[in-house]
Amino acid sequence: MLLTEIGAVEIIKHMDADDYTIPPEMMAALQHAVDHAAKQVLPLGPMPPAPCEDMVLLEKTAREKLRQMAHDDYTIPPEMTALMQYVAEQAARGIRDPEAMRLACEDMDRLSEEIFRKHGILDIGVPAIRALRDGDDE
């Protein structure tokens, strides 16, 4: 049974006001739709699981491409898209690559230091949250 055959209206009809459970056949149809959508958005296997060196090379290539982009060009380079897709798939599968995590931490630390050298301490979070909370117009 496909989700389009059931329809959202049918799902709502089958739900009691006090009982928000979805009948098993409708849940199966929803799961089928979610699985189908996931395969359309993140097809499995566009990039084989790569050793960490390949991932680092892909990341460097994508990063260089981003640096070369004009500021008004907001398209994501294919290399960066491939890297994001690969990382999302690894995360969805629960795969944790210690070497990739270590490299990511080093990269984040390096970027934090670079931002600190250029701009100093950027203490904008707490004042912004307080302004939002208190309704200040600052």
Image (tube, helix red, strand yellow):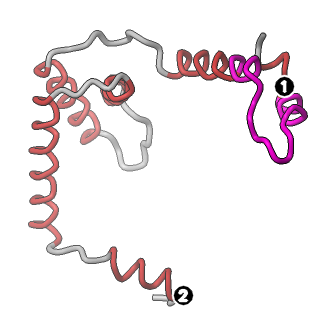
Circle 1 Cα neighbour tier, 10 Å, few/some/many (<14 / 14–19 / ≥20): few
| Residue on which disc 1 sits | 7
Q: How many marks?
A: 2
- Helix, strand or loop at label 1? It is helix
Question: Is residue 119 shown above or below 27?
Answer: below
Q: Residue at x 45, y 88 (%)?
A: 138
Verify whether residue 22 appears in magenta: yes
Give percent across and percent down for residue 111. 15, 53
Given residues 130 and 47, the one toward you in this image is 130
State the quadrant of the N terminus: top right
| Residue on which disc 2 sits | 135
**Which amino acid lies under the numbered mark 1 shown in the image of this protein?**
Gly
Region of the chain picked out in magenta, as a range:
8-29
Given residues 14 and 58, the one toward you in this image is 14
Question: Is residue 136 shown above or below 62?
Answer: below
Answer with left or right where residue 28 lies relative to residue 101.
right
- Helix, strand or loop at label 2? It is loop
Q: Residue at x 87, y 31 (%)?
A: 14
Verify whether residue 105 appears in magenta: no
Which badge, 2 or 1, is on the more N-terminal residue? 1
